[in-house]
Amino acid sequence: MHKIEIRGIKCFGFHGCLNEEAKIGQEYIVNVELETNFSKAIETDELNDTIDYCEVFNIVKAEMMLRKKLIEVLGHRIAKKIKNNWESIEKCTVEVIKPYPPIGGEVQEVSISVTA
């Protein structure tokens, strides 16, 4: 089994339970970890034999455009969509980081991690 990580995907989104979050929005950071088998790609040196990082990035960006109240739901949707896009993915773990959440105190970030 092999691992592919795509870290630090910056996306702007309007997620959260507060009405202000739906209006103002903020930047989020998404990390994706894929457990897959890219042995064939090692032999062929062909993109078609592995996971296309650009396609993963595009899935993340598209899902980030769909407003959700909970980043838990957002992470789950991203993980499922990525995993369903490639048969070779055994596990897809998505971390969604929300910097400086509006929780009434000084907090650097909150994050969730979902595995599909």
Image: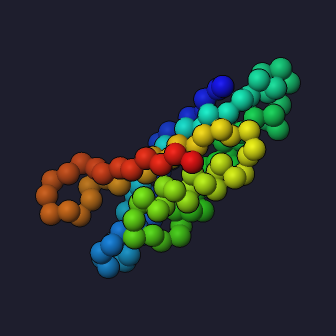
Q: Is residue 40 left or right of residue 54?
A: right
Residue drawn 56% across the image and 35% down it: 5
Asked if 67 appears above or below 110 in the picture, the reply is below
Residue drawn 49% across the image and 55% down it: 75
User: In terms of depth relative to the viewer, which is nearer, 79 or 6?
Assistant: 79
Q: Position of residue 11 (x, y in %)?
A: 48, 56
Q: Is residue 47 visible?
A: yes
Residue drawn 30% across the image and 75% down it: 18
Q: Position of residue 97 (x, y in %)?
A: 38, 50
Q: Is residue 77 left or right of residue 111?
A: right
Q: Position of residue 8 (x, y in %)?
A: 47, 42
Q: Quadrant of residue 71?
A: bottom left
User: In terms of depth relative to the viewer, which is nearer, 105 or 83?
Assistant: 83
Q: Quadrant of the N terminus?
A: top right
User: In terms of depth relative to the viewer, which is nearer, 65 or 87?
Assistant: 87
Asked if 19 appears above or below 116 in the picture, the reply is below
